[in-house]
Amino acid sequence: MVCKAQKSQDFSKIQGRFERISLSSSNTNEVIEKRLLDKKEVAKANLSALYEEKGDIIRSQLSFEQSNSAEMANYKSTDDFVNNYPFVPYQFNLVQKIFTGISRAGASGQHMSRGERSLIDAFQIASKIYANDAVGRLIPIYSFYNSIKKFLDDAVVRDINHASDKSTINDFSVQVLQTLFMIRYVDEVKSTIDNLVTLCINEIDQDKRALRLNIEASLEVLERNNLIARQGDEYIFLTNEEKEIEEAIKKTDIEPSDETTELSNIIFNEILRRNNTYRYPENKQDFPVARFCNGVPFDRNLESDVLLKVVSPIDNSYDDYNDATCANYSADCILIKLSDNQRIFDELRTYIKTEKFIRKSSSTSGSEQEQIRRDKANENMNRRKRLVLELEELFKQSDFYTLGSTFDAKGSSISVMLEGAYRYIIENTFGKLKLIKPFPGNIINEIQQTLVAGDTAQIGLDLGGEEANPLAVMEIEQHVALSDDHGYPVTAADLIKKFAKRPYGWNTDEIILILARLGLANKLVFQANQQEVPLKSLYEHLSKSQKRANLRIRRIKQQSEANLKKAKKLFKDLSFGTAPSAEKELFNAAIEKLDQWLEKLKEFKSKSSTGSYPGVEQIDDGILLLSELTELKTSFQFIDTFIAKGNDLLDFEEEYELLENFYETQFGMWQSLDRALHITFSANRSFLEKGEEAKAALDKLTAIFHNPRPYREVSKIKPLIEKLASINNQLVEKQRSHTVKKLEQRITEVQELISNAGAPDDISNKALLPFQNAIKRVQNENSVSLIRHELSEADDWFTDAETAVNNFIRQQQAIAKKAQENKEKEPQASSSTSSTQGSYAMGSGSTTATPEQVREKAPTTPKAKPTQAINAMEVYKEFSDSTYMETVEDVDSYLKILREKLVSLVESDHKVRIK
């Protein structure tokens, strides 16, 4: 061995011997070079020659992945090689990081020094292992395991020792396990196979390929023994806790269907990005694709004409899918046979098991197992990402079959490869695809313009022209006709679905354009909710898929020339004008005229409902007749019914003219008649009927009002109303004059009473107000009965006035009497005071006199006498129960009693009024 092995392990002695060298952690490698790796001149010469000869090979052998190049230094020069041999420069930094990582992770059982002494110790122990080997030996990283073994936790050492005891695990596999443990906690080195090969090289001329195969075999053995776990390209040393979880994951049961389901999700949702349709570029039609994986459908839509089937090694019948079988199975579809990559599908199973384990397992929050589960979840997320990428690459390398033979799928991406296959299957299985040449312009605008073009555009419409796709038009027209003949309803949704499928494959908008043109040509009719949809409103029903299922399409039957001739004559006889020659135009014109009648009748019905008007029955009959015709949605049905109802229509035309004249020109006069009979003359009718002329006019107006067909007599209404109004006015004026005169007479009498009694103004105003208000009412009243009623009320008002005046007189008499009595009692008292209070009748108020006022003006007895009304009939009833006086004795008795009452009142100083 060209290096000098140092026996001493006392770092302090080394430091004391070389005082000029600073032994900090940053330059420990310098100490190792000077003391442990110092070489004789002969050895240096030999090593220099070796590097000059094989320097490139050495650097290549010891290179790491690009991502590790910064931390994992290689030999830079001959001197560098000579100074560091048999160690590699990266090992100085790596071993220090191993010490640090193990200590931080808690894998060490006792204090583990990460300083200069431990590092020098590690390199010294490793160098002793190969001290007697020939030049060309390199020290692999696992040689450092013995130097750190004594610091490790017993569990870690025990696991590695147990591995070495197993007969299925050879010594090299144990060394690989030791390497994986040491770099487990070093982030700078990924534990990939390439890096493990570099870390385990122990000879300059070592066969790197053979070493790789040995490492792969070892990794497989270690993984099978649950000592390590694969995470993508990396292999991870497992702790005891991780082993438990890893073992639990491996024992997690999954079904084959779980594998197929997850594989389907990755392929169809992620690799193919949920794309379940293919747009054929020639006609922009979207073809739905039904997708299968291992024979299991991925989509609910299994009726698609384009089928994509993927078979993978997961399928139990995978081995049966040879070229002949695949060709046979692809007779009506695209079949893709995925290559058998055991590692990828093992990864898929691991992903599924891990997901299932994580979902079902539980542990205490914050525990070590919980942390491991979270790490596993993150690892599994990354595993899925890798699976997507790896399966995408596997997909590109797979075999494609379609229509019974292999298919050369070309393209840089799976989408492009599949588009080629889709196009191939469409162009070779849709035999009538070319019957439609795509519309060259904006097809949506063309559809809308066709639907709103109107009947005039029908003249220039040529469905036989090449641009109209006549063969396609014929296919659709024949399909609708056959369905009608067999009684099968056809909806827009059904029709579009039929012609979008094999063997047609037509674009939906192209089909809608043909339907629009057939509708404009009056060959198809469209109905929704049993109502015909006008062409102008049809686009909304055709453009929205949810409304197509409710849009029925029917063939329009054509009328015979004989029936058209009859319909045209009836059109003219109904005074509708000259009839159009074409069936559809005749239908539209007749419907328009009948609709006008119907709308008028509905207006007349609305008017008639507001009162008592003639023609109500005829209006209802007309609405029923016309509605039956206007509700027909096809020209064929309409013309048949129009002719059948011809006589009814002609009869109703005469009635319609009378109704139209009445409700549009005579309606106001009829309202005047109604108002005259039930409002204007109603109150005075009994008085008017006493006169012959007025009674005759009333009877005539009443007869007209109750006539069910009064149309020819309406002209007589106005003069009869005017005559009645004149008579009524005279009658009212006569009664008004008489009543006012009587009321004024009563006012004069009341004023005389008040004046004689000397009553104050408030009594006067209150007594006269009812008479004055009555006069105002009479001036504005037109009812003779109500005018007369005012006179009957006048007697009560006069009685009230008498009562008020009488009360006043009595009050004044009482005041005067009291004053006289006081004066007689105290004739000499000059300072005597008197107070008199009284209140007028009918709430007139109160009066208070002070002593000074009494001295100035003494009260006097009123000159007027109180009045008393005697009801002569009431006096008679006092002595007799009979209504009539039949004898002289009855008369004498009555007069005697009446005289006694009158005399008594007069003698008691009253004025008497007989009622």
Image (cartoon, rainbow, N blue to C red):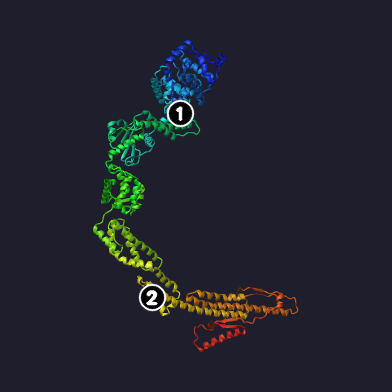
Can residue 494 be seen at all in this image of the molecule? no
Residue located beneath label 2 in the image: 700
Q: Are marks 2 and 1 in contact (CB under 8 Å)?
A: no
Farthest residue in the bottom direction? 888
Asked whether residue 193 is in view, the answer is yes
Q: Which mark is residue 242?
A: 1
Q: Earlier in the sequence, mark 2 or mark 1?
A: 1
Quarter of the image holding residue 897?
Answer: bottom right
Q: Residue visible at 54% across and 87% down?
A: 893
Question: In the picture provided, is 422 more to the left or to the right than 164?
Answer: left
Query: Residue 70, image x and y in percent?
Result: 47, 24
Q: Position of residue 793 (x, y in %)?
A: 53, 77
Furthest residue to the front? 460
Q: Residue at x 31, y 57 (%)?
A: 588
- Could you tell me which secondary element the residue under label 2 belongs to? helix
Q: Is residue 148 above or below residue 843?
A: above
Q: Residue 285, percent across and down? A: 33, 42
Report the quarter where the C terminus lies.
bottom right
